[in-house]
C-alpha cells in the first residue's frame, strides 16, 4: 500500500470516527443554545469557543462530520448510480440513446463549476436531501462520461466478442464482464467525488443555499465565521480546517488508489 | 487559407452547436423554475396577499400560460434584452451589464495570477525534480487544491485586512481592494496549473528530441526554453483558457466574502429576494460567457496548431 493511500485511509477513518463517535463525545447537542455565552473565544467551558446564540463550536464541528459524510456518500451513490446506468447503456448500445445523452451532457457542461447546483439549490427549499439532489444533478455527468468511454474501449475486446458469440445476453455481459473491468477508474473518480461533494455542500451552505438552518454543517458555521470575522475569528478556523482535512484525505485516497490500481507502478 | 479565414470557417461550423447548447441551457433554466414547491406568487407576495395582487402578479409573470408559451416568451425577452426583473424597474440585462465587468476584472486578474504563479512553480518543480523545491511546489499544489475558497477568503481577510491592516476588508475601491479577492479566487487554479505544468514538462523532458537537442551540445537554457517549454505548455495554456469559466462560477463565493459588486453578488441578492428572471439572467450570462470562451479557446488552439493547417 502506498503512502498516499495510507494517508487517505487514515483521514477517512478520522472522519468516519468523528461522524460515528462524535455525537456521543460532543459536550452539547447541535440544538443547544445559551445566549449568555455568545461568540466566546476558545477556552473555559468551550474547547473551540462558542458561536452565534451560544452554540458550542466543538460540538458543531463533531456533528458536522456526519452531515458532510452523509452528503458526500449520498451524492457519490446517486451520481454513480445514474452515471453507471447512462454510461453503460450509451457506451454499449450506442445509437440514438448515446446521441441524446451526449447532447444532454453538452448542455449540462455549459454550466461551469457548481453554478447549476447553486441554481437548483436556490429554487428548492434548504434541506439535506435537496443539497444531495442539487449536487447529484450535475455530479452524474462526470461518471457517465467516464463509464461511457471505458465501456467503448472494453466492448471491443476479444473476450467480450467471445461472450457475444456464446450467445450471452447484454445485461449479463455488462454486469459480469464489463463492469468489473472498469471498476478501477470509477472507484478513483468516486473518491475524488467524495471530496468534491463535501466541498460543494460546504459552499452551498456557506451561500445560505445548503442545509436547513440549525443543521450543523461546516459550511454554515464558516458562513457565521465570515460574518463575525472581526469579533469572533475563531468561528471560521475550526470548520475550515475540518473541510480541508476531509477534502485533502479524499484527494489523497483518490491519488493513492490510482497508483495502487495502476499495474505499471 | 489565411489564419483569419480559417478562424471564421471554424466559427461558422461550431456556431450551430453552441446555439443548440445555449437553447438547451435556457430550457433547463426555465424548466427548473417549475420545480419550486408551492407557487411563486405566494413565495413572492406572502400568504397575506390579496386576490387582486395575486392575479396582477400572475399576469405579469405569465404564469397562467402553458410551459411552452412561457418558454417562448422567456426566449423572446432574452433575445430582445427586455427580460424584466420582479423586484426592480431596471431591466435584467442592464443590471447584469453593470455587474459583469466587475466579475470579469476579478476573473482576468485571477487568471493572470494563477498563470504566473502556477507556471513558475510547475517549471521550477520539474527542473528541480526530487529536490526540496519540487517537494515544496507539490506541497503548495496539494494544499492549494484542497483549501476551500470559502475558507481561504476569510483567512486572508483575517490576516491581511484585520490583523495587519494592509488591505481593505471589502468593496472595490482602488487596486488594493483587488488583491485579496484575486488571491482567494486564483490560488486553487494556480495549484492545478503548477501540477499540470510539472507533469507535462517532465513528460516532454524525457522525449527523444530533447535528448537529441542536448547531445547537439545546446545549452540547458536553450533546450528547456526553446524546445521543451514550447511543447509542454500547449496543453497547459489550453486548460488555462478553459478555466476562465470556472473562475466566473467561483467568483460567486469570492464576491460574497469580499462584498465585491459583481454578477455573483447580484445572483445571490436575486436569490434572496426571489427575483427569478434576474437569477435566470445571471445563470444564462455566466453559462454563455463560459461557452463562448471555450469556443474561442478551441478555435484559437485549432488554428495555431500547425497540424490543423494541413
Image (tube, coloured by chain):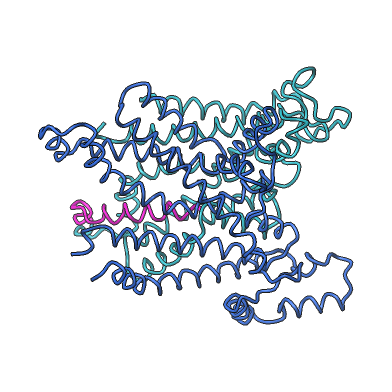
Chain colours: A cyan, B blue
Q: Residue at x 26, y 69 (%)?
A: B2
Q: Position of residue A66 (x, y in %)?
A: 63, 35
Picture quarter containing residue A97?
A: bottom left
> Is B116 positioned to the left or the right of B203 in the image?
right
> Is B239 positioned to the left or the right of B1 in the image?
right
Q: Residue furthest front?
A: B174
Q: In terms of secondary structure, what is the magenta stretch mainly?
A: helix
Quadrant (top left/top right/bottom left/bottom right) for the C terminus of chain B: bottom left
Q: Residue at x 49, y 35 (%)?
A: B144
Q: Residue furthest left?
A: B216
Q: Position of residue A147 (x, y in %)?
A: 37, 52
Q: Give the magenta-colored segment's residue range.
A: A139-163
Task: Report how many numbered discs are placed on residues in the image.
Answer: 0
Relative to the observer, which residue lies in front, A32 or B275?
A: B275
User: Compared with residue A115, is residue A16 higher up or lower down, i.e. above or below?
Assistant: above
Q: Position of residue B280 (x, y in %)?
A: 63, 66
> Is B55 positioned to the left or the right of B99 in the image?
right
Picture quarter containing residue B164?
A: top right
Q: Position of residue B34 (x, y in %)?
A: 65, 69
User: Compared with residue B22, is residue A220 higher up or lower down, i.e. above or below?
Assistant: above
Does A57 lie within the magenta span?
no
Quadrant (top left/top right/bottom left/bottom right) for the N terminus of chain B: bottom left
Relative to the observer, which residue lies in front, B276 or A102?
A: B276
User: Compared with residue A230, is residue B59 higher up or lower down, i.e. above or below?
Assistant: below
Relative to the observer, which residue lies in front, B150 or A251?
A: B150
Q: Residue furthest top?
A: A44
Does A153 lie within the magenta span?
yes
Relative to the observer, which residue lies in front, A250 or A48?
A: A48
User: Compared with residue B288, is residue B197 higher up or lower down, i.e. above or below?
Assistant: above
Amino acid at each position: 500500500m502506498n503512502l498516499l493511500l495510507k494517508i487517505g485511509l487514515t483521514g477517512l477513518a478520522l472522519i468516519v470516527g468523528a461522524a460515528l463517535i462524535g455525537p456521543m463525545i460532543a459536550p452539547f447537542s447541535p440544538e443547544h443554545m445559551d445566549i449568555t455565552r455568545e461568540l466566546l473565544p476558545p477556552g473555559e467551558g468551550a474547547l473551540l469557543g462558542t458561536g452565534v446564540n451560544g452554540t458550542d463550536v466543538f460540538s458543531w464541528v463533531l456533528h458536522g462530520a456526519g452531515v458532510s459524510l452523509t452528503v458526500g456518500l449520498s451524492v457519490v451513490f446517486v451520481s454513480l448510480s445514474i452515471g453507471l446506468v447512462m454510461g453503460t447503456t450509451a457506451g454499449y448500445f450506442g445509437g440514438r440513446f448515446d446521441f441524446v445523452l451526449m447532447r444532454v451532457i453538452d448542455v449540462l457542461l455549459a454550466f461551469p463549476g457548481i453554478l447549476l447546483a447553486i441554481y437548483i439549490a436556490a429554487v428548492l427549499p434548504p434541506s439535506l436531501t435537496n443539497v444531495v439532489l442539487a449536487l447529484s444533478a450535475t455530479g452524474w455527468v462526470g461518471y457517465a462520461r467516464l463509464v461511457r468511454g471505458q465501456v467503448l474501449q472494453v466492448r471491443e475486446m476479444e473476450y467480450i466478442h467471445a461472450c457475444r458469440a456464446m450467445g450471452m445476453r447484454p445485461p449479463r455481459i455488462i454486469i459480469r464482464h464489463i463492469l468489473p473491468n472498469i471498476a478501477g477508474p470509477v472507484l478513483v473518480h468516486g473518491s475524488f467525488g467524495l471530496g468534491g461533494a463535501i466541498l460543494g455542500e460546504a459552499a452551498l451552505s456557506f451561500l445560505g443555499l445548503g442545509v436547513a438552518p440549525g443543521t450543523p454543517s461546516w459550511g454554515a458555521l464558516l458562513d457565521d465565521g465570515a460574518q463575525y470575522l472581526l469579533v469572533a475569528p475563531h468561528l471560521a478556523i475550526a470548520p475550515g480546517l475540518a473541510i480541508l482535512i476531509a477534502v485533502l484525505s479524499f484527494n489523497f485516497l483518490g491519488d493513492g488508489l490510482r497508483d495502487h490500481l495502476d499495474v505499471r507502478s | 487559407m489565411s489564419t483569419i479565414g480559417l478562424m471564421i470557417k471554424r466559427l461558422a461550423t461550431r456556431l450551430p452547436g453552441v446555439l443548440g447548447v445555449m437553447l438547451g441551457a435556457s430550457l433547463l433554466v426555465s424548466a427548473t423554475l417549475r420545480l419550486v414547491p408551492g407557487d411563486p406568487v405566494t413565495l413572492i407576495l406572502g400568504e397575506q396577499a390579496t386576490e387582486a395582487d395575486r392575479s396582477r402578479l400572475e399576469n405579469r409573470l405569465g404564469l397562467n400560460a402553458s410551459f411552452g408559451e412561457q418558454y417562448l416568451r422567456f426566449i423572446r425577452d432574452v433575445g430582445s434584452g427586455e427580460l424584466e426583473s420582479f423586484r426592480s424597474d431596471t431591466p435584467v440585462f442592464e443590471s447584469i451589464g453593470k455587474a459583469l465587468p466587475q466579475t470579469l476584472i476579478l476573473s482576468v486578474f485571477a487568471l493572470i495570477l494563477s498563470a504566473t504563479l502556477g507556471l513558475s512553480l510547475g517549471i521550477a518543480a520539474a527542473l528541480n525534480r526530487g529536490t526540496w523545491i519540487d517537494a515544496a511546489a507539490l506541497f503548495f499544489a496539494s494544499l492549494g487544491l484542497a483549501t476551500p475558497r470559502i475558507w481561504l477568503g476569510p483567512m486572508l481577510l483575517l490576516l491581511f485586512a484585520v490583523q495587519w491592516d494592509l488591505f481593505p476588508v471589502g468593496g472595490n475601491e482602488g487596486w488594493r481592494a483587488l488583491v485579496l479577492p484575486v488571491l482567494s479566487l486564483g490560488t486553487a487554479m494556480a495549484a492545478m496549473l503548477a501540477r499540470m505544468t510539472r507533469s507535462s514538462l517532465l513528460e516532454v523532458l524525457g522525449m527523444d528530441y530533447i535528448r537529441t537537442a542536448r547531445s547537439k551540445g545546446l545549452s540547458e537554457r536553450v533546450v528547456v526554453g526553446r524546445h521543451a517549454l514550447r511543447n509542454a505548455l500547449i496543453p497547459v495554456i489550453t486548460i488555462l483558457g478553459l478555466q476562465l469559466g470556472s473562475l466566473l462560477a467561483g467568483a460567486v463565493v469570492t464576491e460574497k466574502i469580499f462584498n465585491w459588486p459583481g454578477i455573483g453578488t447580484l445572483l445571490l441578492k436575486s436569490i434572496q429576494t426571489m427575483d427569478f428572471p434576474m437569477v435566470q439572467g445571471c445563470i444564462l450570462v455566466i453559462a454563455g460567457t463560459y461557452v463562448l470562451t471555450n469556443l474561442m479557446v478551441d478555435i484559437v488552439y485549432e488554428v495555431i496548431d500547425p497540424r490543423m493547417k494541413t
